[in-house]
Image (cartoon, grey):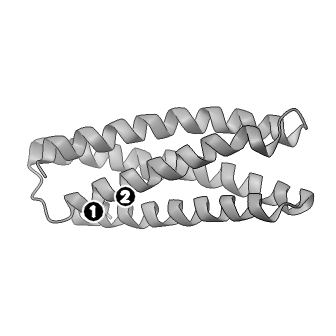
Amino acid sequence: MEEAIIFRDFEEYAIKLDSLLTKLRKQVGNFLKGRATFTDLKPNIVRLRHYNELMTKTLSSAEGEEISSEYRDLFLTLVEFVMTVSLGEERDILETLRKALEKKGGDKERKLVAEALNEMNILEKSVKKIYNSLGKL
């Protein structure tokens, strides 16, 4: 896949992920205060998992590609953002939700959150791998 397409796709998913995390943070806050149910959160958790899968696939398609210096800096900036901001935010949101669900019960809900955490960990490994291949870690 061409580097411009890989970058464009990864950037698009990163922006969508960041926007979704903002919404999810607010929803989890409402859930913790009793103003929302898990049913309200579930569609965004499913979308979160979907974006993580798409980002992982995009990064895996970039593994064998030679990235030019023009895109290298752009890629590094975006990958650093995802590593330091998005994945940290996602982990914080999902861990907060997981802890709340442990107190409230709900096996299906906890399983969905655990699966989302697992997919986030897979994405994190892919992000670190591409970061390493770009020579920065």
Q: Which residue is mark 1?
A: 60
Front-lying residue, 72 or 113: 113
Say which residue appears at 68% left-offset and 38% top-offset. Answer: 25
Q: Position of residue 5 (x, y in %)?
A: 18, 42
Say which residue appears at 85% left-offset and 63% top-offset. Answer: 102
Q: Is 83 on the left-hand or right-hand side of 74?
A: right
Say which residue appears at 9% left-offset and 58% top-offset. Answer: 66
Q: Position of residue 67 (x, y in %)?
A: 12, 53
Front-lying residue, 90 or 61: 61
Asked which secondary structure carries label 1, the reply is helix
Front-lying residue, 125 or 107: 107
Q: Is 51 on the left-hand or right-hand side of 95?
A: left
Does the CB distance between marks 1 and 2 fall below 8 Å? yes
Tally of numbered discs: 2
Q: Position of residue 4 (x, y in %)?
A: 15, 41
Front-lying residue, 119 or 77: 119
Q: Which residue is mark 2?
A: 56
Q: Is 25 on the left-hand or right-hand side of 46?
A: right
In the rendered image, the vertical position of residue 105 relative to residue 10, given as above or below: below
Q: Specify few, some or many for label 1: CA neighbours under 10 Å numbering under 14, 14-19, or 20 or more.
A: some
**How far is the residue under mark 1 from the one under mark 2?**
6 Å
Asked which secondary structure carries label 2, the reply is helix
Q: Position of residue 63 (x, y in %)?
A: 21, 64
Q: Specify few, some or many for label 2: CA neighbours under 10 Å numbering under 14, 14-19, or 20 or more.
A: many
**Amino acid identity at mark 2:** Thr
Q: Quadrant of the C terminus?
A: bottom left
**Amino acid identity at mark 1:** Ser
Residue 16 has which mark?
A: none
